[in-house]
Image: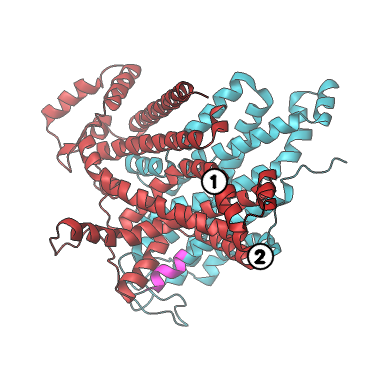
Amino acid sequence: MRRQDPAARWMGAAILAVLGAVAAAAPLVAPGDPYRLTGPALTAPSWTHPFGTDDLGRDVFAGVVHGAATSLRVGAVGAAGALLLGVLVGGIAGMRGGWIDQALMRAADFVQAMPRFFLAITAVSLFGGGLSLIMLVIALTAWPGTARVFRSLVVSTRRREFVLASQAAGAPERWILRRHVVPLTISVAVAHASYQAGGAILAEAGLSFLGLGDPSVMSWGTQLGFAQQMVREAWWTSVFPGLAIALTVLGCNLLADSVGHRTDRPQPIP
Amino acid sequence: MTSRTFAAWVVRRLAVAAAVVAGVAVVTFVLIHLAPGDPIYLLAGDGGSPAYYADMRARYGLDRPLPAQLATYLAAVLTLDFGYSFVHQAPVSRVLLAHAPASLLLGGAALALATAAGLFAGVLPALTRSLAVDRVVRWGASITYASPVFWTGQIFVYVFAVRLGILPAAGITTARETLTGLAAGGDVLRHLLLPALTLSLPFAAIIARVVRAALVEIAREPFVLATSARGFSRARVLLGHAVPNVLPPVVTLVGLHAAQLAAGAALIEALFGWPGVGHLVLQASLHRDYPLVVGAFIGISASVVFFNAAADAVCAWLDPRVRQT
């Protein structure tokens, strides 16, 4: 029996909804370029600068507000990559079986064994940093876990009586997948993809922290990279962007937990 | 299961690991040839003489067809020849090996801390049978797992090094003092504490989560009921009988997160100025020392894959059932 706090069920969704609202309202809440100098350097949080300013007088609050869109995009791309490629690869492997299954799962092992963070560092070094390159690397490396889980679900669903019955009745494989297998398994794949969103956000923030991110967009990781030089005198330059990352990743993971828990048992068959 | 079949199992696992490393080398080869600019600078480094480049062009066979180039490249990688770093004025493999011990010390210490803390926190709910404790452990693990190490590290530096002034904030030794023997070891340990603690946190969180969940499952096993029925104390049933059975999943989990551990270590090394491979990669990337970046990627991949295989072997050794699959 697995239990979960009822609070956790809606908290994940609530955190991400607030984040989406902040990202959408960024031009209204904090108008202008977040890299703009707005006041004296290193001032503590106040009414004019709720999260204080950094060593160049940039408003930390504006950075956090504008960074939301970057993290949201990266998270969405990570989740989408995991979901699309994971369902495709896992679905084919689970439905076909045999050597195709073997080959696809070995490919999944391979991608999973590759240290994606260093792959991203290598790609950024060779090709030059850009958010689309970072998102591409993240999307192309996010799928193996989801593929593995989805494959095992497809395999177990395929053995159930109603699937066997439609197979015996001559239904085509693609129809069985769409009509019977995907509806029973997709929510678990979505949950897995949500975990990947959290991982993707952490990866982008890490790269930006190291100074390998996209210099043309605001990112919480970039803010923490700047804060590295001034955290001794100005705690606020680190605390607020970091809190934003932690909350967002927590939101993705809580959402994943709640979806997974709701659907990890086979649903009743009408 | 005899020791001979176990040896065969290990050999098979190592063969898989070697295949993965070869695959990583193919990926880097493709990246080098897709990247803009002349691949010779990516293969041989930036800053050599024209004669050197002519020599290296012949060596990597850049005038030959791509499959032949790939074969040459793979042969070079498999003999640990990753080229020459002009920034360090030394072969890449030597530069990497010189920085490996610091990273292994950091990673090993973090793993040890994470295992101890994760087991402790994961056992607490079952040991105390308190819903409040359970809730604290679950939420604590969720929050810790979501917090980026390069942020918690900054907070720790602010609290322990800046405000309290009890631990050093950067480096591996105290630069102004020349210590020897035991004092030098103690100095390194003092510098190790904050980075290792920071790096250990997310891994402690996943270990705690898995241990807690596994104990909930195991508590319903007949052997646990049987030991309880014999009148053993709860602590003895848990620590003597239940916990040994959750160790294999913990080892597997740690093995699967080797890549994240390496990535976390790189971030921590950058944050604390810890002179390991991660710090090296970052510097190499900023200085466009391409052979070093690519060589480090292959080297780190190989260590991650090897670590995975080692975790599987430990698991098979702990749990005979694993060997049969």
**Residue located farthest toward the front when viewing the structure as drawn:** B230
Identify the residue at image location x=75%, y=40%: A184
- Residue B125 in percent (x, y) is at 60, 60
- Magenta part of the protein: which range? A235-242
Which quadrant would the C terminus of chain B be assigned to in this image?
A: top right
- Residue B199 in percent (x, y) is at 40, 55
Q: Which chain is cyan?
A: A
Q: Amino acid at mark 2?
A: Leu
User: Which residue is disc 1 drawn over?
Assistant: B244
A241 in the magenta segment: yes
Rendered view: B63 above or below A61: above
Alpha carbons under labels 1 and 2: distance apart: 24 Å
- What colour-coding does the image apply? by chain
User: Which residue is disc 2 drawn over?
Assistant: B131
Using the image as rendered, state which of residue A151 and residue B5 is in the foreground: B5
B62 in the magenta segment: no
- Residue B141 in percent (x, y) is at 54, 59
Rendered view: B289 above or below B177: above
Using the image as rendered, state which of residue B89 and residue B145 is in the foreground: B145
